Image: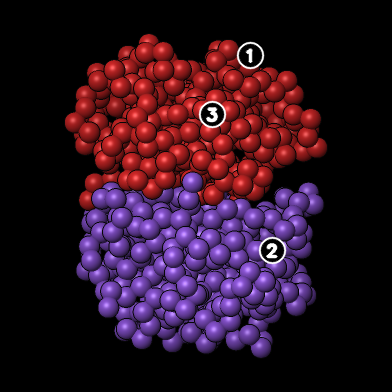
Chain colours: A red, B purple
Amino acid sequence: MSNYFKLKKPVGIAAYSSCGGPKEENGPIGNYIDIHFKDDKTGEKSYEKAECKMFESVVQNALCKSGLKKQNISFMSGGDLLNQIISSNFSARDLAIPFIGLYGACSTFAESIAINSMLLSAGYGEYAISVASSHFSTAERQYRFPLEFAKQRKTTSQWTVTGAGAIILTSHKKDVQVTDVTIGKVIDFGITDAENMGAAMAPAALDTLEYHIKNSGNRVEDYDYIITGDLGKLGSDILLSLAKEKNLDINNRHIDCGIEIFDSCKDDCGGSGCACSAIVITSKYLRMLSEKKIKKILYIATGALLSPISTMQGESIPSIAHAVTIEGTI
Amino acid sequence: MSNYFKLKKPVGIAAYSSCGGPKEENGPIGNYIDIHFKDDKTGEKSYEKAECKMFESVVQNALCKSGLKKQNISFMSGGDLLNQIISSNFSARDLAIPFIGLYGACSTFAESIAINSMLLSAGYGEYAISVASSHFSTAERQYRFPLEFAKQRKTTSQWTVTGAGAIILTSHKKDVQVTDVTIGKVIDFGITDAENMGAAMAPAALDTLEYHIKNSGNRVEDYDYIITGDLGKLGSDILLSLAKEKNLDINNRHIDCGIEIFDSCKDDCGGSGCACSAIVITSKYLRMLSEKKIKKILYIATGALLSPISTMQGESIPSIAHAVTIEGTI
């Protein structure tokens, strides 16, 4: 059975919003981000509460832009990197919108867009929100070391993005629409270094890319950009070589959200975290589609499905990639 | 907008399977469980690997019962209680079935049935698997104390169920079908005691119950059973009183999976964990529906969306409940 699905009818994008901290604002796409928090803690008592504030701010901002109220939204799906996705769950409590909790690590935003689009295209609801968040300091605390420890980072490490992105999808026709999706498989090439997630995720990105291109009947040239999130520099290089072996030359069209969001000369191997591709898509690329500067993107978000426990138990890093096509109607 | 959805067409149940450990086998519904593991560790090196084995065993057993192959399955959705849902992600890697990772704590199984049913009813795929697992020893390690510490349990504590449950859903007509769903809201009544999750979840169960009954146009009497999972004894008592205040008298039809699975005189306040209601539904109640002993159940799975971090930070326990109706065609 196919896990590629052409939507029964395209699903419109009614509004979108992004937020980030100071490091994201100072990065190459900083000017595209809607809400800038001058302080990573956003005035809250903990980084966890700050992440909730970011999650809620993009949902509220997207609602405001669309002119919709919470009562118009049938459901929201999304997630984050924290154990038991508490940023999302606590935010969903405060927002009081029916909630589908997802966990796909950094692939969560595409997973959410895929599910919401399929449900809306089938007539289940009129408006639905896709949302994802991450925070450097909540992720470091949970996955790695206390910030105060100031651990030396490896050259392969990626920097978890602080912020959130949200899209309001709708069953109504809009200028920019989601048209098809691929639900990814979990792929594991045996990488065990939790500080080299780009290498672990590249094979999953390739698997979904190849499958989506083949089943959609499209060619690489039909997309203005093929946007992965978030392989970083090293992972992107691996993807490009692997794709070449499969006769998929994506060099001229490939963008990686992990590379886009930070200045790659300074910041490790690029960005990561659920918010990385969520911000890049909802700031720069949806805007370019809305302004008709580009016509069609294939967004493939990748997730490294490890946990600190699985790493300590010597397990390798399984990875997944979900894909959605987003395109202008003209 | 409504978050109650009548399915565009009913979604059939092609097969189902359950597994459990020795404590589950010795409980009141032990005889209904398909696969009994004589040892909680199932011969593996860690409890985490044992949980994966249980997850995979119910998927493989359901496939075997249905006569289907993995290649027939369009996607699988599900989850577990562990950080980054590693039991599910590692199992999805080994099963090589396209995967939608969910996190809804103990509500995950109903969340999965709801999403899969909506997608299949819309023509997205022919077969899909819903699955959830939990394990007492992996949950204790992560949420509470080392087993060796032998902490005294409170009278309000629930015991995490060890095992898994899986359903293969299909777009084809079957004798037993899913007909409607409600996606729940996150509800928080301010309970902060992580050892009293039944009390935290009861208001979420009530919210979804009331909403589902009202929007489906059904009456309480139309269901043979209204099955919550898993409030335990205390949470069930709270639900019954709260429901009575809303003029919903469910006393004669209410069953709680947390009470059903263990002998309630001995085992704390009842069972909990994603596997609790997954096992009770896929062992006893789907069989009763298949054998035409009952006609219609409303399955409302509840999840306590806390994390050890949120508890340590003094946060209350947000909860959610998702509902699905499962009924015989005759």
| Residue A140 picture quarter | top right
Classify A179 as above or below B311.
above
In the displayed structure, would residue B84 be above or below residue B266?
Answer: above
Query: B147 or A84, which lies in front?
Result: A84
* Closer to us: B162 or B132: B132
Do we see residue B101 in this rendering? yes
Q: Position of residue B195 (x, y in %)?
A: 73, 67
For label 3, the crowd category at 10 Å Cα-Cα, with few meaning under 14, some 14 to 19 and many 20 or more, is few
Residue B4 pos. (x, y %): 46, 56
Residue under label 1:
A26
Please tell me how crowded label 1 is: few (under 14), some (14-19), or many (20+) other residues with Cα within 10 Å. some
Q: Secondary structure at mark 3?
A: loop
What distance separates the C-alpha of mark 1 from that of mark 3? 30 Å
Whether residue A140 appears in this view of the structure is no
Q: Which residue is mark 2?
A: B200
State whether discs 1 and 3 lie on one chain. yes
Question: Is B122 positioned to the left or the right of A229 in the image?
Answer: left
Q: Quadrant of the image for the C terminus of chain A?
A: top left
Three-letter code for the amino acid on which mark 3 is drawn? Gly
At 47% across and 40% down in the image, what residue appears? A128
Do discs 2 and 3 share a chain? no
For the residue labelled by badge 1, is the local secondary structure a helix, a strand or a loop?
A: loop
Chain letter behind tag 2: B
Residue type, label 2? Ala
Front in this rendered view, residue A327 or B33? A327
Of tags 1 and 3, the one toward the viewer is 3
Which residue is pictured at 54% across the width and 66% down the height? B209
According to the image, label 3 marks what residue? A67
